[in-house]
Image (cartoon, rainbow, N blue to C red):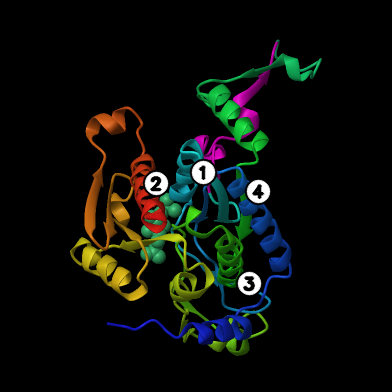
């Protein structure tokens, strides 16, 4: 079983091999202020990570490696956390699915709206009609979105590259550590396991005239280790484990828990992830499964995951107090 690397060396690797985003300190202050404000109001705060990381192959990047993640899990979960009374720092991939806006995927907003009378002469917003087929439930969704905005319950933070993700996650962990056990980490992003260090990356576009391309990539440091041990040691931490082979999934999830000693792993298989997950904790294993009726009634698996984890977070906080 692979041992986690020593966390101080991860700090060094992060600083040396992953370009630090220029705005990281500013974002860290915003996240700390957000956490402090909500904690003072008696609200818990969850950091939701969402979407896939981009791994550049050249420093003046033309090409990069990406992955399948749409960000739907993270965006939907953020909504259910806010419905459960949490404030959410939403660390997400630029242009991945976003809370509430995700309800209208593939809809061009302008196709969903029409001017009354059809000639558009007045152009007054009061003359705008909504096409309910293209924008179903838009009133209900908009109302909730506005409540969330007015209550300042959602702090969006964007990343695109793996470097941005790693530095922003570290900043978020340190910012939320100030609120102790009332912070939760919900690490649903699909993060690359491989990268090319800045020092080994060609500056310019790789030339196809040089023939077939062979890449040698390094292992990305296991960031969960310093997060749990050093950056936010009192928080409730949930990681996600995705596999394509169901036969190895639970063993891999348990191995992650043994290695990092955090609170929960949500295990899922690529093809069935929308309807079936297993929440694994050190002392339990809960299978969450959508029935045909659930699917008919548009119940989402994220509602079940969030409900399971917020209860576990309750117990975690009570356990710390007792
Ligand atoms: O973003 P999405 O809704 O398309 O997919 C969600 C997911 C599969 C990326 C997430 O549930 C997950 O498992 N994230 C961790 C992936 C990993 O093992 O690195």
Query: Residue 131 location, x and y as percent?
Result: 57, 20
Give me the residue at 36% from left, 38% from top.
300
The residue at label 4 has a CB less than 8 Å from ligand 1: no
Give the extent of the magenta segment: 97-116
Quadrant occupied by the C terminus: bottom left
Residue 295 lies, in percent from the top left, at 30, 33
Gap between marks 4 and 1 measured at Cα: 12 Å
Residue at numbered disc 4 = 37
Q: Are marks 2 and 4 in contact (CB under 8 Å)?
A: no
> In the rendered structure, which disc, 1 or 3, sits on the residue that comes first in sequence?
3
Mark 3 and mark 2 in contact (Cβ < 8 Å)? no
Asked which quadrant contains residue 244, the reply is bottom left
Residue with the mark numbered 1: 86
Instruction: Indicate which disc, 4 or 1, sits on the residue closer to the N terminus.
Output: 4
Q: CA distance from mark 3 to mark 4?
A: 41 Å
For ligand 1, tell me if the residue under mark 3 lies within 8 Å: no
Circle 2 residue: 310
- The location of residue 98, given as percent across then percent down, is 55, 45
Badge 3 marks a residue whose secondary structure is loop
Q: Pointer 2 and pointer 1: residues touching (CB < 8 Å)?
A: yes
Residue count near mark 3 (Cα–Cα under 10 Å), binned few <14, some 14–19, many ≥20: few
* Dot placed on the residue nearer the N-terminal end, 2 or 3: 3
How many numbered marks does the figure carry? 4
Instruction: Tell me the residue at 60%/36% (across/down).
Output: 148
Q: Is residue 222 left or right of residue 286?
A: right
The answer to whether residue 178 is seen in the rendering is: yes
Mark with earlier residue (2, 1): 1
């Amino acid at each position: 079983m692979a041992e986690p690397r020593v966390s101080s060396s991860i700090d060094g690797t992060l600083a040396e091999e992953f370009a630090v985003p220029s705005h990281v300190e500013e974002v860290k202050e915003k996240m700390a202020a957000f956490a402090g404000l909500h904690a003072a109001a008696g609200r818990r705060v969850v950091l939701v990570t969402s979407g896939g990381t981009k791994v550049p192959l050249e420093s003046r990047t033309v090409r990069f490696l990406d992955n399948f993640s749409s960000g739907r899990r993270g965006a939907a979960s953020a909504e259910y956390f806010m419905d459960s009374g949490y404030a959410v720092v939403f660390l997400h991939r630029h242009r991945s699915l976003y809370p509430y806006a995700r309800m209208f995927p593939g809809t061009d907003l302008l196709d969903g709206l029409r001017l009354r009378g059809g000639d558009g002469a007045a152009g007054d917003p009061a003359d705008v009609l909504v096409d309910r087929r293209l924008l179903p439930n838009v009133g209900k969704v908009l109302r909730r979105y506005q409540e969330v905005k007015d209550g300042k319950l959602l702090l969006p933070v964007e990343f695109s590259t793996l470097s941005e993700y790693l530095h922003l996650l570290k900043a978020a962990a340190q910012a939320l550590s100030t609120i102790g056990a009332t912070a939760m980490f919900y690490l649903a992003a699909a993060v690359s396991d491989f990268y090319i260090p800045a020092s080994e990356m060609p500056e310019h576009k790789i030339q196809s005239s040089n023939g077939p391309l062979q890449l040698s990539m390094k292992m990305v440091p296991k960031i969960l280790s310093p997060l749990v041990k050093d950056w936010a040691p009192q928080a409730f931490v949930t990681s996600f484990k995705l596999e394509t082979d169901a036969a190895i999934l639970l063993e891999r999830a348990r191995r992650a828990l043994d290695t990092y000693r955090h609170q929960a792993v949500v295990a899922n298989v690529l093809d069935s992830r929308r309807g079936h997950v297993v929440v694994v904790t050190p002392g339990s294993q809960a299978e969450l499964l959508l029935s045909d009726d659930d699917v008919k009634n548009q119940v989402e698996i994220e509602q079940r995951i969030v409900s399971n984890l917020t209860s576990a977070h309750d117990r975690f906080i009570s356990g710390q107090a007792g």
